[in-house]
Image (cartoon, rainbow, N blue to C red):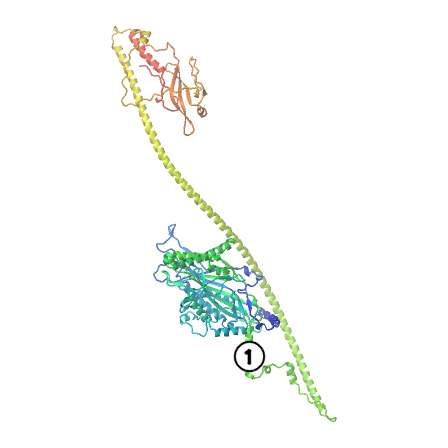
Amino acid sequence: MDVGKREGTFKPNLRQQGCEREEKKDERGGHGEMKAAAKSKTPRKPGQKNGSSNNLKDPVGVYCRLRPLSVPDQECCVKVINTTTVQVHPPEGYRIFRNGEYKEVQYSFKEVFNVGGTQKHVFDVVAKPLVDDLIHGKNGLLFTYGVTGSGKTYTMTGSPGDGGLLPRCLDMIFNSIGSLQAKRYVFKLDDKNGVEVQCDVDALLERQKREVFQTPKTPSSKRQIDPEIADMINVQNNCKAEEVDEDNVYSVFVSYIEIYNNYIYDLLDEGPFDPIKPKLPQSKILREDQNHNMYVAGCTEVEVKSTEEAFEVFWRGQKKRRIANTQLNRESSRSHSVFLIKLAQAPLDASGDNVLQDRELITFSQLSLVDLAGSERTNRTKAEGNRLREAGNINQSLMTLRTCIEALRENQTYGTNKMVPYRDSKLTHLFKNYFDGEGKVRMIVCVNPKAEDYDESLQVLRFAELTQEVEVARPAEKPVCGLIPGRRFKNQAFREELSRQLEIRGGPIDGDRERSITEVLLQNFPPMSSCELLDIHDDQTLPRLIEVLEKRHRIRQMLSEEFSKNVHSVKGMLQELDSSIVSKENYAQVKMAERDKFIAAQKTEIERLEKKAKTLEYKIEILEKTTTIYEEEKRNLQQELESKSQKLQRQVSDKRRLEARLQGMVTETTMKWEKECERRVAAKQLEMQNKLWVKDEKLKQLKAIVTEPKGSKPERPSREKDREKPLQRSLSPPPVPNAPPVRIRHRRSRSAGERWVDHKPPSNVQTETVMQPHVPHSITVAAANEKALAKCDKYMLTHQELASDGEIETKLIKGDVYKTRGGGQAVQFTEIETLKQESPTGRKRRSSPSSRSPAEEGTESEWTDVETRCSVAVEMKAGSHLGPGYQHHAQPKRRKP
């Protein structure tokens, strides 16, 4: 309380200075009230202050309201979780399966109004702050958004007995400024979104002119209220704004337009009606004033003085609004409606009687109440013709609004400078100033929780939640005029007291003037006697004069003594007051120092928190970028995984085809080798049969020799005779009937172009035979290797083994070199040449040669020579039991029987 008293001591000085400045201004201005009206810049943009208020931003306030279900047992897909969150779940039969569960989505808003929320509660939370800002010179935008039939028009307009946001806003405005309104036509609107302030004489002439030519545009407050709307505006709340400037005068102007098929129409236009040839309403155009604010050119703006007048104007335009009956809504709005409330205010002069003519001190604020048409799907409304065209234009304008909101959000979130497409729609072009920082923006999302609107409600709630991320610059405060506050009511109180005194005394105003201290003192002195001396012997006049003067002198001394006492007492009181003031000043300074320290600490804390917030925002931005990078990498990896999966599937299919092909080749090769084995077995059987036949023949000859008498034994012919007449051998038995024929391998050409690999193991013994194996164009190696085989196409292995008679037997195993599929070489043996050295005396003899007859010896010589010849000159052909391969084979010598 002490600080307040101390501060109050300085206010009269400031007010006195303000009065002096105002009086000087009035003296310079002369008779300014009788001059032409002054124009204001509307809405005026005051200069930026040194503070950081213009850098502050407020997010778009988004609220959600649920309407009750039309049928009590109807399926619901939206549920309220708490006062700020709703949950949307798919209805039965339309569940989105994800990981085995249906998807439930939650959306958060500034506040959620449940089904039981009243119109008053919605107004107090959403619209009341906007009306308070309107009265304090700030703009505001409030619009309802949602699916068709979700309760947007009901929220904005209301119903009989329960008014909506619009009548409650009007009621609050006129409750706040009812006694502070200016007379009609003191504020006059121009055609360029500006306002003029007229003097009292011009306003009076304008009122008389309008009374003579009464037009329906300006409703009269004395007329009977339409009973259709009487219940809507009968609001008993008496809600008022706080801290209304009582030294200003106010005037309210309203206008009502609709945006239909992307054209703007004036719903208050009262053009002449021609019943024979009616004219279609003319669309209005948008213009930009000198302060770059958008307005509707040529729109009707009506000055109203009460809630009833304003709502009657609204209801007159509401009857012209385009509505239609669809399958989803009986009264579906086919256009976006915009109800504009403009409030003009200007301060009074120092006397508190007249409006100041200074254009810089006139404030023009605006509140826009927008009822958006509901988004709808034509496959549900079954719209055709004009209804289909209207639905397309409604959805297009709402899509443009969504695009603008997303562009603003992207620019503010990522710091981009993307162009916001305001001009793509009349709706967004009209309100672009609000999103650029000309006032607060509030949105009410109306939701119908029935299951049939699940898809549309999901899209609406998703867009509304994203809208909260858009921030709008906070508007600047209006300037202060600098005049004495309370001058209106002081002037009124003075006039009332003056009138009361005049009524009591019934005299002039000077009779009521208080006498000065000098006059009171002079009246207390004794009256002066006559000082005129008419006779020289007059001895009474001078004594009387001396007595009066002495009496006056005594009174004067007494008064001076009393005055000096009073002066001392006043000085003491002043000293006491001064000391108390000094002590209070010291106390106030101490408190101010403490408060300054506290404020400095708070500023330091705020700076620290701001730095921390910036750091966190930077970290969040980095995390978002990292998340974006990871998501991109995840998508790339998923694409790579899908491509590799497809490639793996192709490889698996190729492998299966290859396995099937190889299986066929294995089967074919198996059959081929089975046939080859059968052929070889048949050839071997034939060979064994031939050998068995030879043995049978030998046994027969032996048997004939044994059983033949010795005397009749024929002599053994000589060697020459045998050579001339060899013994006829019996014919060989016929071949086996089913044995396959043996393919005879022809000897390969040993041309000079063939190269040989001469494989001579180091363990071989050098023989002293005359005939030595000699292979031209050969590469001699001690061990077979791939390098040598790659250069040649023939192979020969020199193999030595000890024969049964103790002699060294040399075999030359020959073969062809082939390239394999793996890039290596393989050798297929084709024939074997055997070289053997034996002594002519080394033949075997019988145990008793003297007892044998010559014939027997000749017979023995024959088969012995055949056997010996076969064992020495055996040449193995392809297809023998050696077979293809890279091995050393030695054929054992067959013993004689």
- Residue 257 point in image, percent of width and height: 45, 64
- Residue 155 point in image, percent of width and height: 42, 64
Q: Quadrant of residue 717?
A: top left
Q: Quadrant of residue 776?
A: top left
Q: Is residue 740 left or right of residue 132?
A: left
- Residue 821 point in image, percent of width and height: 41, 29
Regarding residue 645, the answer to whether it shows in the image is yes
Q: Is 637 above or below relative to 295?
A: above
Q: Is residue 690 left or right of residue 613?
A: left
Number of numbered labels in the structure image: 1
**Circle 1: residue type:** Glu
Q: Quadrant of the N terminus?
A: bottom right
Q: Is residue 103 left or right of residue 593?
A: left
Regarding residue 889, the answer to whether it shows in the image is no
- The residue tagged 1 is 497
Q: Quadrant of residue 689?
A: top left
Q: Is 811 above or below relative to 584?
A: above
The one nearer the camera, 772 or 313, is 313
Q: Is 851 above or below relative to 71?
A: above
Outermost right residue = 536
Q: Which type of secondary structure does the marked residue at label 1 adopt?
A: helix
Q: Quadrant of the C terminus?
A: top left
Outermost front residue = 276
Q: Is 668 above or below relative to 347?
A: above
**What is the crowding at mark 1: few (fewer than 14 residues within 10 Å), some, or many (at least 20)?**
few
The one nearer the camera, 543 or 731, is 731
Q: Is residue 46 left or right of residue 561?
A: left
- Residue 770 point in image, percent of width and height: 42, 12
Outermost top residue = 711
